[in-house]
Image (spheres, rainbow, N blue to C red):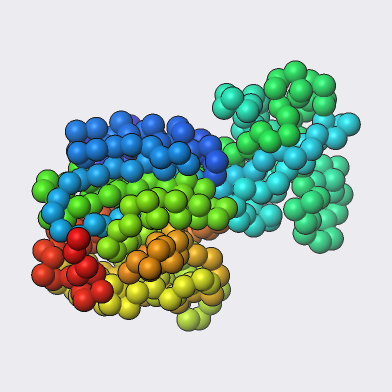
């Protein structure tokens, strides 16, 4: 109570929404609960909202001129039941990229196929289970979930192949009110940022589509479908990126708390140079701290925007997160707030200020 009392009413509201978004169950392929939360938050702030056949939520603020697509993905990494052995041990497959070492000892929720909570479990492996000396780290195939129940008892609870499993982590602040922690920061932080931008953008100088995508973690499928349908003049993915500020390395890269980060290159694309230069120029005018990143692995929804139809000028702006592809991450609210200010500033710019590749009017 003491921590909450130091916050303003607005800050308390923000933290409540972040808690609701991050704690919602929403692995790839099962994003309905997250979508419903976003729909409720956007009521009265956008002109249109609809859900496409894949499950993307498309919210539109009507304006004149070019069409803009701004995307954040709703899905989170998770696990899926693939086998229950005779001892009642649940073997699982990963949904999205998760480092196996981060799963050991984790408490998890196991859901029935209709989406209701069936029971809890603990991820373990044989040596840990029996307190033997651990000579080497286990592979993913060695891990299993122990619920203390038999195979028959699990089946009676409705647990079967294809059921989702999500780690049990609550949203919280850490060292101070600005350092937040929780599951699914990738990319509920992006979803939160776009909700805030849509609320604060009173008049749209262009036709803006806020797209909350599905199945990004397993193949960028939501962005592929929505970009093809909307055919925007330019696109922006709002996502997260791993912070590179560990004391283990002498040369630091992207740091938590030092501002949003333009992803110049990732494993699949080199993002649009003119768009990146324009974003950097706007950030400088608005005095918003900005970082740059060249990455060897991973990619974002911007890839599917970039490669849609005749090609869409697109890029990605990210929020640094520590422990990114694990069951719980850490982020700085300063980066989240700066992301909101930056995207808002970009969307408010008049058409005459857009870089050349983005001046394709209909």
Give the position of the N terminus as an image quadrant. top left
Query: Residue 186: percent from the left, percent from the top?
Result: 46, 52
Query: Residue 70: percent from the left, percent from the top?
Result: 31, 55
Residue 355 in sight in this render: yes
Q: Is residue 228 left or right of residue 268?
A: left
Identify the residue shown where x is 30% and y is 74%.
Answer: 276
Give the position of the C terminus as an image quadrant. bottom left
Identify the residue shown where x is 33% and y is 52%.
Answer: 230
Compared to 13, does 306 lie above or below?
A: below
Query: Residue 79: percent from the left, percent from the top?
Result: 64, 43
Identify the residue shown where x is 55% and y is 70%.
Answer: 297
Q: How many marks?
A: 0
* Relative depth, front residue between 237 and 103: 237
Quadrant in the rendering for residue 289: bottom left
Identify the residue shown where x is 32% and y is 78%.
Answer: 273
* Relative depth, front residue between 254 and 131: 254
Q: Is residue 165 left or right of residue 257?
A: right
Q: Is residue 201 left or right of residue 183?
A: left
Query: Residue 347: percent from the left, percent from the top?
Result: 19, 58
Compared to 267, does 216 lie above or below?
A: above
């Amino acid at each position: 109570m003491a921590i909450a009392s130091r916050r303003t009413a607005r800050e308390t509201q923000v933290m409540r929404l972040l808690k609701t978004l991050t704690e919602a169950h929403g692995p790839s392929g099962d994003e309905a609960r997250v979508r419903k939360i976003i729909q409720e938050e956007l009521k009265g702030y956008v002109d249109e909202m609809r859900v496409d056949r894949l499950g993307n939520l498309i919210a539109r603020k009507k304006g004149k001129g070019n069409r803009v697509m701004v995307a954040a993905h709703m899905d989170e990494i998770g696990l899926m039941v693939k086998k229950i052995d005779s001892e009642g041990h649940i073997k699982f497959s990963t949904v999205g990229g998760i480092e196996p070492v981060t799963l050991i000892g984790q408490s998890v929720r196991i859901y029935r196929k209709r989406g209701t909570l069936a029971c809890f479990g603990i991820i373990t492996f044989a040596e840990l289970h029996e307190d033997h000396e651990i000579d080497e780290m286990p592979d993913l195939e060695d891990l299993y979930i122990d619920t203390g129940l038999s195979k028959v008892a699990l089946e009676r609870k409705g647990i079967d192949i294809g059921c989702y499993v999500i780690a049990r982590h609550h949203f919280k602040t850490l060292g101070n009110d600005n350092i937040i922690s929780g599951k699914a920061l990738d990319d509920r932080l992006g979803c939160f940022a776009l909700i805030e931008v849509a609320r604060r953008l009173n008049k749209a100088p262009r036709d803006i589509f806020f797209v909350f995508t599905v199945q990004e973690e397993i193949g960028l499928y939501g962005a592929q479908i929505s970009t093809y349908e909307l055919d925007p003049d330019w696109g922006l993915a709002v996502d997260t990126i791993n912070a590179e500020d560990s004391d283990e390395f002498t040369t630091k890269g992207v740091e938590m708390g030092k501002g949003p980060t333009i992803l110049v290159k990732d494993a699949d694309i080199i993002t649009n140079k003119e768009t990146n230069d324009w974003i950097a120029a706007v950030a400088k005018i608005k005095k918003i701290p900005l970082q740059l990143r060249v990455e060897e692995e991973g990619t974002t929804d911007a890839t599917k925007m970039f490669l849609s139809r005749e090609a869409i000028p697109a890029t990605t702006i990210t929020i640094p997160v520590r422990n990114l592809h694990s069951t719980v991450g850490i982020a700085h609210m300063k980066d989240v707030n700066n992301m909101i200010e930056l995207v808002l500033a970009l969307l408010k710019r008049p058409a005459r200020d857009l870089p050349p590749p983005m001046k394709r009017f209909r």
